[in-house]
Amino acid sequence: MINFEEELKKFHPSLEIEEAEDAIYNQDLTDIADLLVGLVKEDKESASEDKQ
Amino acid sequence: MICYNCGATLTHNDFCTNCGADVARYKKIVSTANLLYNMGLDKARVRDLSGATESLRQCLKLDKSNIDARNLLGLIYFEVGEYVLALNEWVISKNLRPTKNIADDYISLLQDNPAKLDTYSQAVKKYNQALSYCYQGSLDLAVIQLKKVLSLNPKYVQAHQLLALLYINDEQWEDAKRELNRCQKIDVGNTITLRYLNETRNILDMDDGDDAFSPGGLDLKGRKGFGDQKKRDRDTADSYSIPVIRKENRTLATIVNVAIGIMIGIAVAYLLILPARISAAREGVDESLKATGEQLDAKTAQISSLEQELKSVNGQLEKTKEELEVYTGESGKMSAMDDLLNAVNSYLENPEDTKAVAEYLDMIDEEKLAETGESFNTVYLLMMSKIGADVGSQYYDSGMKSYQAEMYEDAIKDLTKAYTYDNSNGDALYNLGNAYRKSGDIVNAVETYNKVIEEFPDTEMATRSQQYVNELNVD
């Protein structure tokens, strides 16, 4: 059986037009490719430090 | 595919031919993202929008620059009524690729139709309000608000689901099923919809299978195909009770429902249909009254116009009569001409009988002389010159006799004629003034004396007349 109270918790307010700007600015756009690039960069930096 | 390091186009090699960066893993990530995009597209094509959303989100987590995936995700959000999320995706997409991007068209479509955008915004606000009502426990208000939301945006999946949940909570299973079916037409793969629908169908199936129920409650063991339900309810069965359904009660309820339905039908007929008919009939009567009124107004205007015309015609008739009177009346031109002809005739028969001639000439109104022709005037003056002095003398004598006999009215009449026939007779004029004075007609007396002073200046009569005028003016 469906528990109304529990189910109700799954519903969240929808974003309103006025909130659109904040939502766009605050959206985390980091993807796996960014992480990979970061990792590669860190590897390169650590390798150069080891050489020094 | 471009290099993450320098932006150069990548080849089939696992390194960038421009900067030498290792792109093997990067290529795998982008390929996986493309695979997820394709999956999302396939799901979207069969209207599994929830599944498509999930795949596209994963795709974008791997590769945020997959513009097609982002645009498609925006479209799916738009389809399920989440306009702000849709706009978010399209705006980000446009920022990532400012040119040759279909997101530009989508944004323009929304921005160019502010009324529609306002409707969407209203729908979202009302949905949030309904959700707030739910949290506060005002479930009836929430249902009303959600119905408004769905009238504004019938594709708002979350609103359908929340309304269905409220119906389920209120055990309005058929209504819940209807809402969930609508959800499913928009998004076939939504797990919330499927779960609610499954629950609702099970309950409705139980309602239809009366035989499987014992009078005291629901027999779960005896039902075919209820295994899933049983399994799902195992955890929550303790906290929920399944409605008790009795066959006899349902029969009675059906009869009561039919009776209520009939009563509602009659009430509707009296409250809605009958007033509507009466209103329609009244409108018809009003229309005919209006038409009759307009006809009456037109007729009244016509009558008024005819009256005006009649008045004008009567005026013309009166004028014509007056004109005719000028010619044919007692003092008219025709009469004057007759009198003049008679006078001439009388004179020709007996020139000595000046009195008979004068009788005819007397009948001619002097005022009409001006209106007659030149020949008429010539003849009239000729006759006056022929008999004027003689007749004037006769009238003078007669007038003086009357004056001396103190019969001033007769004297005035004769002396007036005496002066008319012979206007060189100053005595006649002077004595006419005396007659007026003695008869008490001061105005005419003064006027006559003044005429004496004017016509016969430097005479004894003028001097006396002046004296009388002075006396009368002093008085």
Image (cartoon, grey):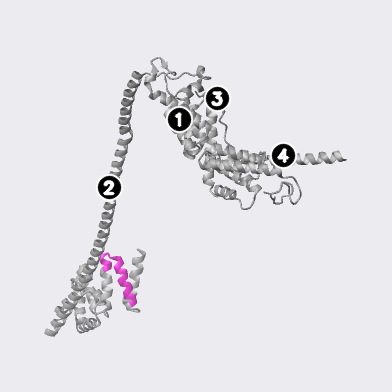
Residue position marked by numbered label 2 in the rendering: B288
Q: Secondary structure at mark 4?
A: helix
Residue position marked by numbered label 3 in the rendering: A6
* Inter-mark Cα distance, 4 to 1: 45 Å
Q: Residue furthest right?
A: A52
| Residue B453 magenta | yes
Which mark's residue is nearer the viewer, 4 or 2? 4
* Inter-mark Cα distance, 3 to 2: 64 Å
* Inter-mark Cα distance, 2 to 1: 51 Å
Q: Amino acid at mark 4?
A: Leu
Residue position marked by numbered label 1 in the rendering: B176
Taking the spot 33% from the left edge, 23% from the top edge, the residue there is: B256
Q: Are marks 4 and 2 in contact (CB under 8 Å)?
A: no
| Residue B281 magenta | no
Which mark's residue is nearer the viewer, 2 or 1? 1
- Return the x and y of residue B437 as percentages of the image width and height: 28, 67
Q: Chain of mark 1?
A: B
Q: Nearer the viewer, residue B97 or B47?
A: B47
Which mark's residue is nearer the viewer, 3 or 2? 3
Q: Are marks 4 and 1 in contact (CB under 8 Å)?
A: no
For marks 2 and 1, the one nearer the N-term is 1
Q: Amino acid at mark 3?
A: Glu
Instruction: Name which quarter of the figure residue B281 lies in.
Output: top left
Q: Chain of mark 3?
A: A
Q: Residue furthest front?
A: B13
* Inter-mark Cα distance, 1 to 3: 18 Å
Q: Secondary structure at mark 1?
A: helix
Same chain for the residues under marks 1 and 3 in the image: no
Image: B327 above or below B241:
below
